[in-house]
């Protein structure tokens, strides 16, 4: 009898707490997906750049970011975070925690605007999103950017809600999160400005004040960096690698926001079909319901990419999906609202399953990916340590392999060649090189008298030279110097030319 009573109480407890238990389970799944292979997936150049800049002192970080294209906030956070450890998994944990906190903000925002059921679905979609998981494992500022924007919108909606009594507190939080967004990314203001769309749907001095006051304070707090912004604008205009966007870039952006690229063509096609059908369903849903709130959120969704698209033709190409990362959140909120409302009809369940399918298709490719720009640098680092002594010069074709390899094993005999001036790859300014602690070499002339020399490049680079019918200029020099004494070793998509070894 006692056992039966205990079982009944246990079952009753589960029934009463099932919603919270479900949210807890979803959150645990999100944590697991973000922590899988967090310390073994190799890094890319951008990650290594963040590491080497963040380990500098605070003043050097400022000078390094001034010569680059980003504000210093993320590098500051990483600077203090790495005081405890520089283990790769630990370093990535910073963005993982930021992204998990953002998931809670997304849940709160969805519940504020819709219902608990919609919020739970949005919570799930966010936590299993390959795009979000990708940025939660990067040593870059995009998770911080999204946290700032999501927190800003949530705080603003709290200030304008009728039941809210803590106006000053939520205004302060809106200012805080908005300022975080501004100091996380130079284009963070694009997501923040979207909030003014509310004025198309709500009017009155009260609403205007609740929108204007926090934005003015954010502008005031951002002023110190805005004075320095012209230097970075010049940098973007003269050394940014993107091109003017077209139709294919829009398609690629959709795939990037909701899946992982690259994937085999069949899986890419399946994913694209699911995304496009979901967008069509969403548009039909908007026109049928004619709900002002849904249309407002739809405008939140499309405004950042539209502004970046226009800027790409007027100023400089900046149509990069990770900059309008907040658009994915607004999409999740809208599609979750549709799923919740059409749940009993079956189509809601089908759409939820389809988005789970996207994650199931994409994530294995994300976890296994080890090609350019995330080549097997750790393996290459181990090979260098094993095969060559400290007196053998190791010359990297460019910064893209040098810094990731140096992250794994920092040695004094490794160097890298500067990018061709004015080329799309010429993105690392001299002052940034100083801040990172390593200056690029103009050429390899000083090493040609050495008996042994190692040159490292990407297979992709060799293919590009071959496509125009020429030999890599450095290889041409090495072949003239070392004749037949060159061995070629392949490590993933990295090619190691060992010169002077008979």
Image (cartoon, rainbow, N blue to C red):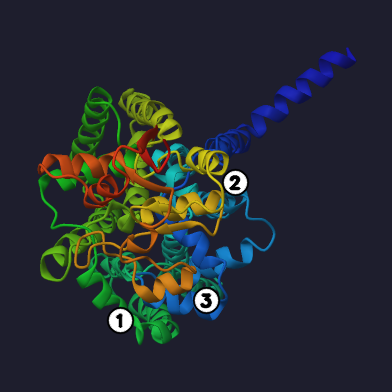
Q: Is residue 96 above or below residue 182?
A: above
Structural crowding at the residue carrying mark 1, measured as other residues with C-alpha within 10 Å and reported as few (<14), some (14–19) or many (≥20): some
Look at the numbered disc 2 and give the secondary structure of its residue. Answer: helix
Q: How far apart, in angstroms, are the residues tagged by discs 2 and 1?
A: 34 Å
Q: 402 left or right of 408?
A: left
Taking the view exactly as shown, the residue that stands out farthest to the top is 1
Quadrant position of residue 458: top left
Q: In the rendering, which numbered label is found on residue 172?
A: 3
Q: Where in the figure is residue 306, as x and y percent of width and height? A: 18, 59
Mark closest to the chain's N terminus, 2 or 1: 2
Q: What is the quadrant of the C terminus in the image? A: top left
Look at the numbered disc 1 and give the secondary structure of its residue. Answer: helix
Q: Is residue 328 above or below residue 164?
A: above
**Are dots 2 and 1 in contact, CB under 8 Å?**
no
Residue name at image x 52 percent, y 76 percent: 172
Q: Where in the figure is residue 343, as x and y percent of width and height? A: 37, 29
Between label 3 and label 2, give the one nearer the viewer. Answer: 2
Mark closest to the chain's N terminus, 3 or 2: 2
Q: Where in the figure is residue 231, as x and y percent of width and height? A: 30, 81
Residue named by callout 2: 89
Q: How far apart, in angstroms, are the residues tagged by discs 1 and 3?
A: 30 Å
Q: How far apart, in angstroms, are the residues tagged by discs 3 and 2?
A: 33 Å
Residue name at image x 36 percent, y 71 percent: 68
Residue name at image x 60 percent, y 36 percent: 28
Taking the view exactly as shown, the residue that stands out farthest to the right is 2
Of residues 145 and 82, the one nearer the viewer is 82
Mark closest to the chain's N terminus, 1 or 3: 3
Q: What is the quadrant of the N terminus in the image? A: top right
Residue 402 visible in image: yes
Structural crowding at the residue carrying mark 2, measured as other residues with C-alpha within 10 Å and reported as few (<14), some (14–19) or many (≥20): some
Residue 111 visible in image: no
Residue named by callout 1: 231
């Amino acid at each position: 009898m006692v056992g039966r009573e205990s079982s009944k109480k246990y079952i009753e407890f589960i029934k009463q707490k099932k919603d919270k238990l479900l949210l807890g389970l979803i959150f645990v799944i999100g944590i697991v997906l973000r922590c899988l292979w967090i310390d073994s997936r190799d890094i890319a150049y951008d990650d290594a750049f963040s590491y080497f800049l963040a380990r500098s002192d605070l003043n050097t970080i400022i000078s390094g970011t001034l010569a680059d294209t980003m504000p210093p906030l993320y590098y500051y956070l990483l600077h203090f975070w790495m005081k405890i450890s520089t283990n790769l998994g630990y370093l990535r944990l910073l963005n993982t925690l930021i992204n998990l906190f953002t998931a809670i903000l997304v849940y709160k925002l969805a519940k504020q605007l819709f219902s608990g059921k919609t919020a739970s679905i949005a919570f799930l979609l966010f936590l299993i999103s390959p795009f979000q998981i990708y940025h939660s494992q990067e040593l870059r500022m995009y998770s911080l950017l999204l946290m700032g924007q999501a927190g800003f919108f949530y705080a603003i909606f709290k200030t304008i809600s009728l039941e809210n009594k803590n106006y000053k507190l939520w205004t302060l939080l809106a200012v805080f999160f908005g300022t975080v967004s501004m100091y996380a990314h130079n284009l963070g203001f694009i997501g923040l400005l979207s909030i003014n769309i509310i004025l198309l749907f709500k009017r009155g001095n009260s609403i205007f004040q609740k929108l204007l006051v926090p934005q003015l304070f954010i502008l005031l707090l951002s002023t110190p960096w805005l004075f320095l912004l012209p230097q970075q604008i010049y940098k973007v205009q003269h050394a940014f690698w993107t091109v003017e966007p077209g139709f294919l870039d829009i398609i690629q952006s959709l795939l990037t926001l909701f899946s992982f690229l690259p994937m085999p063509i069949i899986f890419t096609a399946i994913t694209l079909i699911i995304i496009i059908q979901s967008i069509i369903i969403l548009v039909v849903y908007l026109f049928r319901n004619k709900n002002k709130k849904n249309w407002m959120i739809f405008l939140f969704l499309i405004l950042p990419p539209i502004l970046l698209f226009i800027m790409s033709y007027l100023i400089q190409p900046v149509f990069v999906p990770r900059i309008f990362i907040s658009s994915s959140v607004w999409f999740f909120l809208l599609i979750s609202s549709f799923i919740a409302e059409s749940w009993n009809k079956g189509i809601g369940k089908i759409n939820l399953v389809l988005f789970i399918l996207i994650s199931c298709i994409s994530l294995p490719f994300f976890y296994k990916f080890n090609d350019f720009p995330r080549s097997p640098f750790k393996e290459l680092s181990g090979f260098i340590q094993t095969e060559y002594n400290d007196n053998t010069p190791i010359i990297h074709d460019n910064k893209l392999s040098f810094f990731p390899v140096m992250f794994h094993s920092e040695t004094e005999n490794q160097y890298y060649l500067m990018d061709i001036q004015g080329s799309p790859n010429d993105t690392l300014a001299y002052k940034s090189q100083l801040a990172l602690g390593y200056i690029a070499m103009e050429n390899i002339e000083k090493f040609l008298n050495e008996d042994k020399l190692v040159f490292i490049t990407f297979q992709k680079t060799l293919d590009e030279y071959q496509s125009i019918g020429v030999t890599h200029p450095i290889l041409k020099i090495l072949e003239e110097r070392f004749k037949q004494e060159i061995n070629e070793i392949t490590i993933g998509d990295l090619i190691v030319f060992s010169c002077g070894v008979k």
